[in-house]
Image: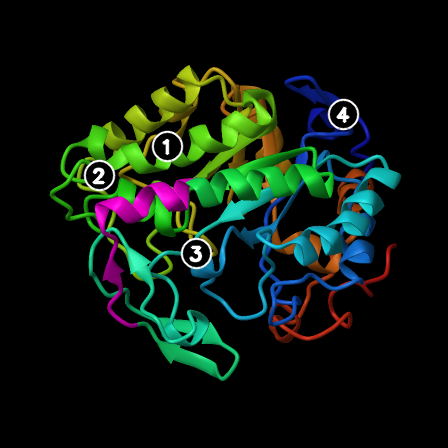
Amino acid sequence: MPDRLSSPVLQPTTLGGHALKNRIVMAPLTRSRSNDRGVPPKFAADYYGQRAGAGLIISEATNISPQAVGYALTPGIWSDEQVDAWRPTVQAVHDRGGLFFLQLWHTGRISHPDLQGGALPVAPSAIRPIGQAFTKDGMKDHVTPRALETDEIPPIVEDYRRAALNAKAAGFDGVEVHSANNYLLEQFVRDSTNKRSDCYGGSIENRLRFPLEAIDAVLSVWGPERVGVRLSPATTMPGETPLDSTVMETYGNYVDALSARGLLYIHDIEGVTQQTRDAPDVNFPALRKRFRGAYIANNQYTLDLAEEVLAKGDADLFSMGRPFIANPDLVDRLRTGAPLAEAPKQYWYGGGSVGYSDWPTM
């Protein structure tokens, strides 16, 4: 097996003021192991602790409020019970010298009344997504969401602030604001899902208003050196969501605004999640150049591809998702050229510790 010990991707580096073991990031991975109250299980400490060889771990997407929930059995960060449950998991990562950020999530229209106590999911506009929601009773067709009233938006901004405070109380090192994958914040950004006529719709400036208000609320808690934002300009899933009609102008303005705020990083899904890296409408290196902080690249990265992109200066860190499911020692396997295990899809979502925290190391 080839020795990749000298790979620049696997060398220690820094992210702002944080020392990282390497440039590999564990991407957020929804695994649906929490209970009905959004409380993560005790064995989540084993799962995340085992993967602390990554330079940075970003938690699975974590709901900021009951209204934010769009998938059954996903964790939250709005209650004291949830905060208490997260603490030992954070400690397990810290005990192994890892850096751990919590991803803050509101799914918006990508939800279902069964997950909302019978209420309609909320969105910028009443546009039904294509596809199905994962509920406790199985997959169910998405419904047409309810458009948020203007005066309902500030309370959601407050939900982001409170979630950021709770993440700090749980001991996390920072937070990532989930503004990707066509969830609520990105639903406001794109003119394909935002047809509003108030101050949160229409122009690019207006469509960016709510996402930036939410990010500013998080910044008021953490400061920019501990906040990142995830973006996905080219992703059409979930919901079979059309791209923004002026995608580079819209996301260029978004990245400029994030850069002006001094954020630690942006985390870009390059291409369509789980499908392709092809993105003819989006110039990711150009977006990277507009941002003064670090750039985390994501989507189907291998060590070879990461080395190639790093050499070009087109990214600083590289997040990997599915390879971490069955390879808790992924970084060691990359370093030694060892084969990677693959997790059957039956273990990806739902269940207990089997197929989650019981994968062997080399």
x and y percent of residue 321 in the render? 61, 50
Q: Nearer the viewer, mark 3 or mark 1?
A: 1
Quick one: label 2 or label 1, which is nearer the N terminus? 2
Q: Residue 154 magenta-drawn? A: yes
Q: Are marks 2 and 1 in contact (CB under 8 Å)?
A: no
Q: Quadrant of the C terminus?
A: bottom right
Viewer-closest of 142 and 322: 142
Residue at the spot 64% in from the left edge and 41% down from the top edge: 167
**Residue 11's disc number:** 4
Q: Amino acid at mark 1?
A: Glu
Residue positioned 84% across, 47% down in the render: 92
Report how many numbered discs are placed on residues in the image.
4
Tag 4: amino acid: Gln
Q: From the image, which quarter does the N terminus lie in?
A: top right
- Look at the numbered disc 1 and give the secondary structure of its residue: helix
Q: Secondary structure at mark 2?
A: loop
Mark 3, residue position: 275
Q: How many angstroms separate mark 3 from mark 1 (CA)?
A: 31 Å
Along the line of sight, which residue is nearer the eye, 161 or 172? 161
